[in-house]
Image: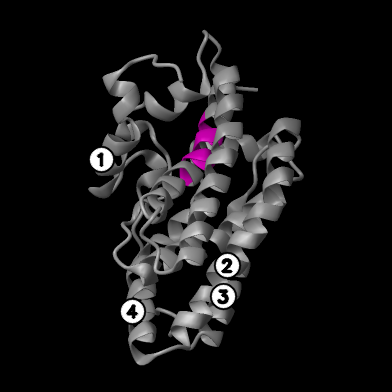
Amino acid sequence: MNNNNLYNYILGIADNTLILGQRLGELCGHGPALETDIALTNIALDLFGQTRNYFQYAALLVGDGKAEDDVAYMRTERNYFNVLLVEQPNTHFGYVMGRQFLFDVYHLLLLEGLQNSSDITLAAIADKGIKEVTYHKRFSGDWMKRLGDGTAESRQKMQEAIDDLWRYTDELFQLTKADKAMIYEGIGVDVSNFKEAYYQEVSEILNEATITVPENKYFTSGGKKGIHTEHMGYILADLQYMQRTYPNMKW
């Protein structure tokens, strides 16, 4: 087995949780209500905890004395392989919940498949994360319904968010070279197999929330290949600041 393919496969999963966790972290202290603020912060912590598990494994594969912090902080923008969806900004609360919901449905399906991986480390990480992500999906799904079927303003903003974010959903199911290699080895999950189930589940909840399912067929991608939106550089400037300013710092 090619360790480089496994390493890149792990990054393709973990960078999603890292960048989404960073986005949610920006909201700490700025939530619309205390309870929601704390919930979003806890979801961010869940995502960072999962990221740490992935990066610890990735660092072990690299060897050469590398640690999880090296994997997290010392890469350039083109070497992050998260989907474009998770790096989209916190435009307003509707965007935060729309982005979270669209990712959560995918994330849970991914972890359910990853539980059956022949790689016992990845299977264990997935098994541990299932309960957390199940809660994440319930939380974001409930907010979709609450906002979509709420006031005229909340529905309008929720519809605006879904209309804008929809273009990033197809990338979730695109397979990279590392994905294909790991699927062949019985390690990875062929996410293209649950694309139909994803859109069906998302559409059902959007309908319940009285949100119109977008009909546009134009989708944007690139993140899985390291080609990101303009937002990514700003995220990394914050994320990497301490390690770049004080290399090899220790707490």
Give whichever of discs 4 and 2 has the lower sequence position: 2
Give whichever of discs 3 and 4 has the lower sequence position: 3
The disc labelled 2 sits on which kind of residue? Phe
Magenta region, residue range: 8-16
Q: CA distance from mark 3 to mark 2?
A: 5 Å
The disc labelled 1 sits on which kind of residue? Gly
Residues under numbered marks 4 and 1 in contact, where contact means CB atoms less than 8 Å apart: no
Give whichever of discs 1 and 2 has the lower sequence position: 2
Instruction: Specify whether residue 199 is in view.
Output: no
Give whichever of discs 4 and 1 has the lower sequence position: 4
The disc labelled 3 sits on which kind of residue? Asp
Residue at the disc numbered 4: 157
Q: Position of residue 137 (x, y in %)?
A: 59, 64
Residues under numbered marks 3 and 2 in contact, where contact means CB atoms less than 8 Å apart: yes
Residue at the disc numbered 2: 139
Q: Residue furthest front?
A: 34
Q: Nearer the viewer, mark 4 or mark 1?
A: 4
